Image (cartoon, rainbow, N blue to C red):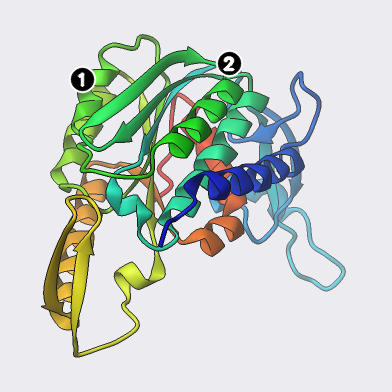
Amino acid sequence: MVVDYCSRATRLLRIASGHASTLVYGSSKSLIKGAGLEYIDFREYTWDDDIRYVDWRLSARNVGFDGDYKFFVKEFQTERKIKAMFVVDLSGSIGFGDKFDTLMYSSFLLLHLAHKLEDTVALAIMHGSRYRLHIDVEPMKAIRILKNEVCIKQPCGVSSLSDIVGVLKKIPRLRSLILFTDYGHDPMVYSSLAKCVKARDMNLLAFIITTPYELKPPINSSYIPLYDLEVGTYTVTSVDAYVKAVTEHVRNTRAILKANRVNYVELHGIAHALKSKVRIMRSYIMARVKCFPSIV
């Protein structure tokens, strides 16, 4: 079956554009609110707020008519015009399930947000062993570049995230590295990336894309043929062996990420990404701050 990646990317771009325009509010000067450097206001706590921003003193002084406390969180004016590097992994494994949709939606969403915040981006698109690097581009142009890339060439090959270490050395004055990838990499590469980012006084935010059937297959105790999308080979294995190998790899990757204090967000399919759009955008805003709090 031929997959029309171009049409899917176009549809997801429209969705992401609409969500970004709806969720980012305020004038173009200063009223995009989020985690930033300058406190500007308080507002009442909602269920999806980060409890680290609750002002406990103010909350302790506010009791409702029902006797329950009302919690308030601080809002900050976010800093503008920073330079971030977006790394989009289009290796073959991204073509499995709906991982491509999830990756496209989340990257388009954050590039739209970067545009609203007047950021400049460097865009690295990883297609197998080769990558395309675009330095100092406006986020809307980066969106067009990314969309055109997937219209020309579908996800393929095996990418190495270790190549990013060398790329970072070519780009000065970066504040953040925003990575869109999956679990199909050696876990130790995150250790190398984290050390490089720390040495350059940058922030690293990784979006790890999965799909429900990748981590939890729909059948048990059977043998299934597996097709490797990256190298193009078939193998036959038991579901139990597959689940065991994948579970161990994911567990090891998570351990490396946490040990190196890498901030990461797991997105389990496009439905989960759509529900998590506010968290995705807040994660980017937090990654723009020099003193980046852990979100894991």
Question: What is the quadrant of the N terminus in the image?
Answer: bottom left
- Secondary structure beneath dot 2 equals loop
Classify mark 2: residues with Cα within 10 Å, few (<14), some (14-19) or many (20+).
some
Measured from the top left, where is residue 295 in percent x and y?
43, 47
Classify mark 1: residues with Cα within 10 Å, few (<14), some (14-19) or many (20+).
few
Image point 75% across, 59% down: which residue? 70
Measured from the top left, where is residue 8 in percent x and y?
55, 50
**Residue at label 2?**
81
Q: Is residue 279 left or right of residue 59?
A: left
Image point 20% across, 47% down: which residue? 185
Q: Earlier in the sequence, mark 2 or mark 1?
A: 2
Mark 2 or mark 1: which is in front? 1
**Residue at label 1?**
166
- Secondary structure beneath dot 1 equals helix
Measured from the top left, where is residue 7 in percent x and y?
57, 47
Q: Residue 203's image quarter?
A: top left
Measured from the top left, where is residue 150 in percent x and y?
45, 38
Residue 38 seen from this side:
no
